[in-house]
Image (cartoon, coloured by chain):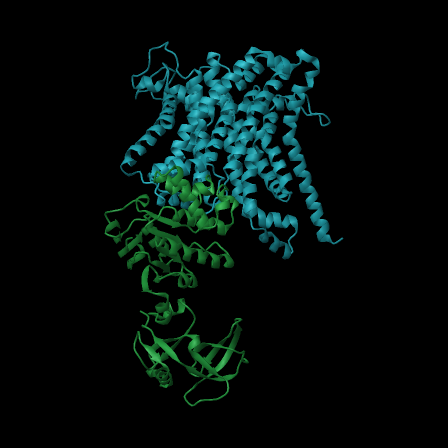
Chain colours: A green, B cyan
Amino acid sequence: MAGLTIDSVTKCFGEHPAVEALSLDIAPGEFVALLGPSGCGKTTMLRMLAGFESLSEGEIRLGGRILASREHHVAPERRNMAMVFQSYALWPNMSVADNVGYPLKLRRLAGETYRRRVAQALSLVGLSPYAERSPQELSGGQRQRVALARCLVTDPDVVLLDEPLANLDRHLRASMEQSFREFHRRTQATLVYVTHDQSEAMALADRIAVMREGRLVQWATPETLYRQPRTAWVASFIGQGSLLNVAAGRPDQRLEEAMLMRGLASAPAERTQPVLVRPEHVTVLSDALSPQALCGRVESVTFRGERYELYLRLESGEALLAYHHAALDEGRQVALILREGWCLEPET
Amino acid sequence: MTPGLADSSQHRWLLTLLMLVIVALSLVPSLRLLMESLGGLGQGSESPLWRVLQAESTWRALWRSLYTSGLGMLIALVLGSLFAFVITLTDIRGKAWLVFCFMLPMMIPPQVTALSWLQLFGPASPLLKSIGMAPPLGSPQPLYSAEGIALLLGIQSAPLVFLALRTSLLSLPRELVEAARISGARQAQVWRQIILPVTRGGLIAGAAMAFISSLGNFGIPAMLGIPVGYYVLPTLIYQRMASFGTGVLAEMASLSLLIGMLALAGVALQQAWMKRSRFGLMGHSGRAHDFSLGRWRGGVTALLVTLLLVILVAPLVALVVSSLVPAVGVPLTWETVTLNAYHEVIGRQGATWRAVRNSLWLAGCAALVLMLCSLPLAYRLQRLPPRWQSLALSAIELPYALPGVVLAVACILLFVRPIPVIDVALYGTLGLIFVAYLMRFLVVCLKPVAAGLAQLDPSLEEAAQLAGAGPWRRLGGIVLPLLAPALFAGGLLVFLLAVNELTVSALLWSAGNETLGVLIFNLDEGGESVLAAAVSVLVVLMVATLMLCLSLLAPRLPKGVVPWQG
């Protein structure tokens, strides 16, 4: 097992940098997600890891070995990696078993060992009965599992996944997420997973690299990203929440209820620190007016099954999202207590 | 009934009638041929079909047809797949130019190709004489042989293999290659184990197309085979018709049936393979998979350029040289260079100018009439149920899929007597060639229009309908402007093919009604190879100009209309 190091990697297409000075240290066996909106450079980064794109600057290392730098480029077939593609990329001229076994054939395995490992890989993804079918006869989810089995079969150092769930419907996604987790647990391989879907990344990854316009914005565990986002952009990209301005705290600081409420009560000119308030930290008091509570008006209500989402307007004019157990009439005045907030860095 | 409904049913009937007439007309020649050759079967061993099947000359010509076309197909396969793989898959430079130059031989008429190669080799070659490398007088012309015919057939049909393979290579998703490489496959392994199997269908389909096209080719075996008595099926029919006239028509119909069946068997094979090769591929396609040639790039580029120099540039140079000398056998120097041949072609109002005028007139009118028919025809065809649609399309395609000689014999059979009822005699007039061109090239004009129509969002027309536009208004105001580029491209393609047509007109022409294709052929046969070369140079210039026009139109056309742009 070897760790994967991305060292200030830059990739330019013409003048335009698709990835700029990106550095990540990925521990052996870690499940990492590259997350960002489309066009943020995450797929380009993945393709550089695979060796399909060259680097303009920087270095990629696996263990002590240099995979790619400006002068040096190890061909994809020599990197001992595996990849799951968005379109599955199953070879239509081969059966399911041949698809799975192809990497073994390239490593000159044959006979009993070959058959055993292919059968093993297929049974792990639950596709043993389909071994002799052609990939075209399979459904989308089954095809994706064939692609997974193909990755599993050779014990690769790193497995790359390029938006593997983008072509599947919602129900299938949930079951495939489970398959990926099991795959990771069983193989202990280093996984790099590219997605634009934050809930997918949060559910699967040990650590997430959030990218925007080719740059790394934040590199942290899902919990940290949710609770302590660095900027307003990350905060709005991951989970729900409201941005308010307070006269308290400094960037990267958690505000307790008392400080937060005090900071919100100050004069508008003094409130310069942006703070993120998650909706679960807002308590809506429909009746008893407490003296330190904020006043707000219900603008609209959305039913989400397990709860209601209230879109509120504060007296200062700022918008606030809150969860509540019951529906409230639109236009109604309510009292609000904000139990905690997270101070963000100002946008550059 | 509301006026709107009455209106639309009248328009439906008119279009349906037009479609039925056209489909029937496309089928008539083949049916007439079938009738003629099978009609005499009652006479037993005296029937024309029986006599043809017993003649030794038939089997000899059949074997020669198969030999030259088969060898030609192999040459086309090697050339076409080399260019397709290198240009589509690797990071070689100057791809657009390589493609254009490689496609040019397909659009140059076969008799011109044959003439230019004849000018390149042999003791009388003005080019070899000019550089002092001509073989001694009396030595044989190496191209007057089965292998010479096969070589030129191969060069002419190599672009067909190239196109079929390039199309299937471009539709190969990039991920399939990348998945193989990350699985550990080297470039050569990816090529052998993934790319080749997945695109095999395209390769075989291209080979079948090259074979069919070589089988029906008349210009090359006529120019290279007839002088030494080497006859393949199309030239055998031509030679018999030329010597015995309409007396041997029934036998010729039987011979035509034989080639027709061979060609259709080839088409069926090709379509079966095309269907098998359609894997329903998913992923990002349409982009070349840049295999890096590395240090081989210079060598590979040199190889392709050399091949192009040999198969395209050298014969064309020989052709130009031949057109600039005062007489056959005179070497080209600063003293001998002359434009006399061109003066003769353009200046004199003789047979040459008449043939040029005939061809321009025939091709222009055919293009115009077919453009007029194509839009309503495609519009009506698109509204047919899929099964009927493909049947109707097959019927329309038949006169183009059959070798030109077959269509020509069928047309003679149809029109040798005045048309009943209206009592118009077409035989021996330019009208006969015109009718044959209309039948043959309809599908060439129809295909781009149909492709464009299939891409058109139906809601565009529905919106016009809701706004109150009647069917003719919609056809003229919405569909026509959107399809105009495709329609124009179809017309241009028809013109390009018709103006150089030789195979059909070789059998249908009569004194005073020569075409450009026949002219080159006759001039060369009559020993006037300098004049023939001058006409050919003009033809090549015209072809290149028309191709360039089509290239300029290409961005506004549906994919695949312009054959040399993928």
Residue toward you, B435 or B220: B220
Which image quadrant for residue B285?
Answer: top left
Residue A128 place in picture, x, y as percent: 48, 46
Residue toward you, B69 or B456: B69
Instruction: Tell me if residue A96 comes above or below residue B214 in the rendering.
Output: below
Residue B350 seen in this snapshot:
no
Residue B8 place in picture, x, y as percent: 69, 49
Residue toward you, B519 or B353: B519
Quadrant placement of the C terminus of chain A: bottom left
Residue B176 place in picture, x, y as percent: 41, 44
Report whether B209 appears left or right of A56: right
Report whether B372 appears left or right of B150: right
Report whether B139 appears left or right of B421: left
Residue B304 place in picture, x, y as percent: 34, 31
Which image quadrant for residue A185?
Answer: bottom left
Report whether B107 appears left or right of A69: right
Instruction: Tell me if residue B419 comes above or below residue B557 in the rendering.
Output: above
Which image quadrant for residue B187?
Answer: top left
**Which residue reaches farthest top?**
B138
Tally the numbered discs.
0
Instruction: Tell me if residue B474 comes above or below residue B67 in the rendering.
Output: below
Residue A339 seen in this snapshot:
yes
What's the residue at 36%, 48% (across, down)?
A82
What's the residue at 43%, 51% (across, down)?
A86
**Which residue reaches farthest right?**
B1
Residue toward you, A113 or A318: A113
